[in-house]
Image: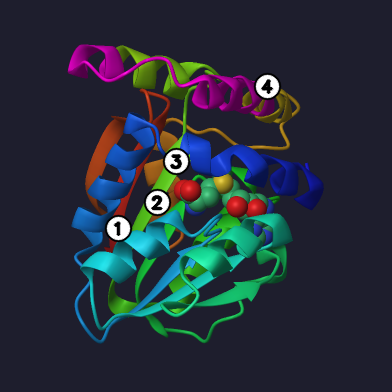
Amino acid sequence: MNRTFWNVYAHVYDQMATSIPYQEVQQLAEKCLEVRSGERVLDVGCGTGQFLRRLADRASGAQLHGMDAASGMLRIARKRVARSAMLCEADLEAGLPYEASSMDAIACMQVLYTARDPDQLLRELRRVLRPMGRLVLVNPHTPNPEAVPDEHFRRARERGYRMDDARLAIAFRVIVAMNRLIVREVRNKRYHFWSVEELSERMVSAGFAVRRVEPSVYGGTSALILATPM
Ligand SMILES: C[S@@+](CC[C@H](N)C(=O)[O-])C[C@H]1O[C@@H](n2cnc3c(N)ncnc32)[C@H](O)[C@@H]1O
C-alpha cells in the first residue's frame, strides 16, 4: 500500500483518534516515555500529530519532532502542532532523516507493520535513539478490523455517553473498510503483524532491551512495548 492509502485514511483518522481505545494507548505511551523538559522526542509516522499535541500540552520544554510520508496526514498535523513541533515529510524506507543518538525518546505507533523491512526500521530506531533513551513501540498482532470501533461503542455505552453521533458512526464504517485493506496486505505478507514474542525477539535482535510489555491494547489487537538500547 502506498501514500495514497494513508492520504485517504487521513480524512477519517481524527475521528478514530477520538475513540476510547486510541486515547488509552496514547495515554499509556505518554506515561511510558516520561518526557522531560529539554529532551528531544521523535514521533515516527506521526500521522495527524495526535501524540505530538499530547506531548506539547503535557511535557512543556521538550523539543518535539515528527515525520511521516503522507502529505494528507502532515497537513492536519501542521495545523495541530504548528508552533510546537518540527515536522518532516519523509519516507522511512529511505532511513530516518535524523542523526545517530540524536533523540532522548521515540514513539513509533502503528507504523512498524507497514515497513517493507521492519527489522531495518528497528535498527534505524536504535541508531537514532541515544544510549539511555526510551522507545515506545505499538504494533498489531491480531487482524480484527472492527475491534477499535466495537470496543469504543461497548465502553462508551458502559460510561453512559450519548450514542447518536452519526458522523462518528459513518467515519467508523470507513475506518473498518480501510482496516480491511490493511488486513488484506497482512495476508499478502506486505504488512507485518507479529505476536508479542516475535516482536520482542526482533527488538532484542535490533539491539533493544525490552522493559515493559502491554500485550493487549487497541481493542486487544496490538501490543505496546517500552524498550531502551542495550
Ligand atoms: C496507522 S497510522 C499511525 C499514525 C500515528 N502513529 C498514530 O498512532 O496515530 C500509520 C502512519 O504511518 C505513516 N507511514 C506509512 N508508511 C510510511 C513510510 N514509508 N514512511 C513514513 N511514514 C509512513 C502513514 O502515513 C500513517 O500516518
Crowdedness near tag 1: few (<14), some (14–19) or many (≥20) residues, C-alpha within 10 Å = many
Q: Confirm or reject: label 3 Cβ below 8 Å from ligand 1.
A: yes
User: Are the residues tagged 2 and 1 within 8 Å (C-beta)?
Assistant: yes
Task: For residue 81, say whether it is visible.
Answer: yes
Looking at the rendering, the stretch of residues picked out in magenta corresponds to 155-178
Circle nearer the N terminus (2, 4): 2
The amino acid sitting under disc 1 is Ala
Task: Identify the residue under disc 2.
Answer: 137
Q: Confirm or reject: label 4 Cβ below 8 Å from ligand 1.
A: no
What distance separates the C-alpha of mark 2 from that of mark 3? Answer: 17 Å
Secondary structure under tag 4 reads: helix
Q: Residue at x 38, y 63 (%)?
A: 53
The quadrant of the picture occupied by the C terminus is bottom left
> Please, is residue 99 above or below residue 31 in the view?
below
Task: Identify the residue under disc 4.
Answer: 177
Q: Provide residue 209's location: percent of width, then percent of height.
A: 28, 58
What distance separates the C-alpha of mark 3 from that of mark 1? Answer: 24 Å
Q: Residue at x 62, y 63 (%)?
A: 74
Residue 85 lies in the magenta stretch: no
Task: Say which mark, if any, is on residue 17.
Answer: 3
The amino acid sitting under disc 2 is Leu
Task: Identify the residue under disc 1.
Answer: 227
User: In which quadrant of the rendered view does residue 17 lie?
Assistant: top left
User: Are the residues tagged 3 and 1 within 8 Å (C-beta)?
Assistant: no
Residue 160 lies in the magenta stretch: yes
Residue 163 vs residue 51, the one in the foreground: 163
Secondary structure under tag 3 reads: loop
